[in-house]
Image (tube, rainbow, N blue to C red):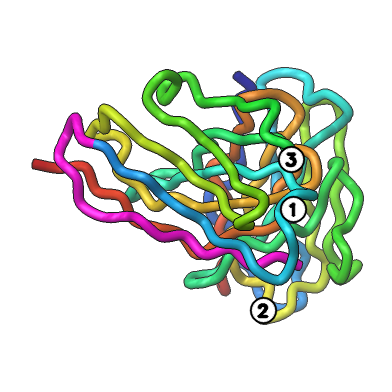
Amino acid sequence: EIVLTQSPGTLSLSPGDSATLSCRASQSVSRNYLAWYQRKPGQAPRLLIHTASTGAPGIPDRFSGSVSGTDFTLTISRLEPEDFAVYFCLQYATSPLTFGGGTKVEIK
Amino acid sequence: EVQLVESGGGLVQPGGSLRLSCAASGSTINKYWMNWVRQAPGKGLEWVANIKQDGSEEYYLDSVKGRFTISRDNAKNSLYLQMRSLRAEDSAVYYCVAGYGWLIDYWGQGALVTVSS
């Protein structure tokens, strides 16, 4: 099983700041099949990024993903008020699919 | 875009059974891999099982193998999860989710399952 470790647990930032979120995999993720989601209370999670760095349709370009080995990063540039939420990663390369524990981006 | 609505959750005693259903609308599910994902209170998301578009392949989390069965009825645009020999640790909100390949795109709002005496 691939274990995904997200850090930090919470990020306190101000609108206009940039956010850097990490998702570290315990082993190689085949074909970089790693996705990022945004989750807000009472709403279904929203797919932001798939295949480590490909933006999902309709996602603003301030959301970007990158990968270096088993370290995956989600960067949110110029935080908007609606970006304060929980973000989690998912590896969908290998069964069982596994999720990271999430990073909460909160208003400072 | 597909909309997913779960039903069938509730309170069940340890060792009991429950069947979750997921009704899809807005699109036919026969183009998607379908999954169940759960989240226990205060815990993170946990993938439970998935099934291929034509039902020919199924995969399960080790801890539910032999107890849970995922199935689908494309004619009814529905997904199911039959849960048997339920344990307290199976208590969670269960989400019906869909995607192209194993990538998860669409999520339902969830159904609460509580296993308790």
Q: Secondary structure at mark 3?
A: loop
Q: Marks 1 and 2, Cα distance to the nearest angstrom?
A: 16 Å
Could you confirm whether marks 3 and 2 are on the same chain? no
Quadrant in the picture for residue B55: top right
- Point out the frontmost of discs 3 and 2: 3
Which is more toward the observer, A67 or B54? B54
Report the residue marked by disc 1.
A20
The chain carrying label 1 is A
Residue marked by disc 3 = B53
Dot 1 amino acid type: Thr
Q: Position of residue B82 (x, y in %)?
A: 40, 38
Q: Residue at x 28, y 34 (%)?
A: B89
Q: Do circles 1 and 2 both sit on a common chain? A: yes
**What's the mark number on residue A35?**
none
Quadrant position of residue A28: top right
Please give the residue where the numbered disc 2 appears in the rendered image.
A82
Q: Nearer the viewer, mark 1 or mark 3?
A: 3
Image point (79%, 49%), residue name:
B31
Is disc 1 surrounded by few (<14), some (14 to 19) or many (20+) residues within 10 Å? Answer: some
Q: Is the residue B49 above or below the residue A82 in the image?
A: above
Q: Is residue B51 magenta?
A: no
Label 3 lies in what chain?
A: B
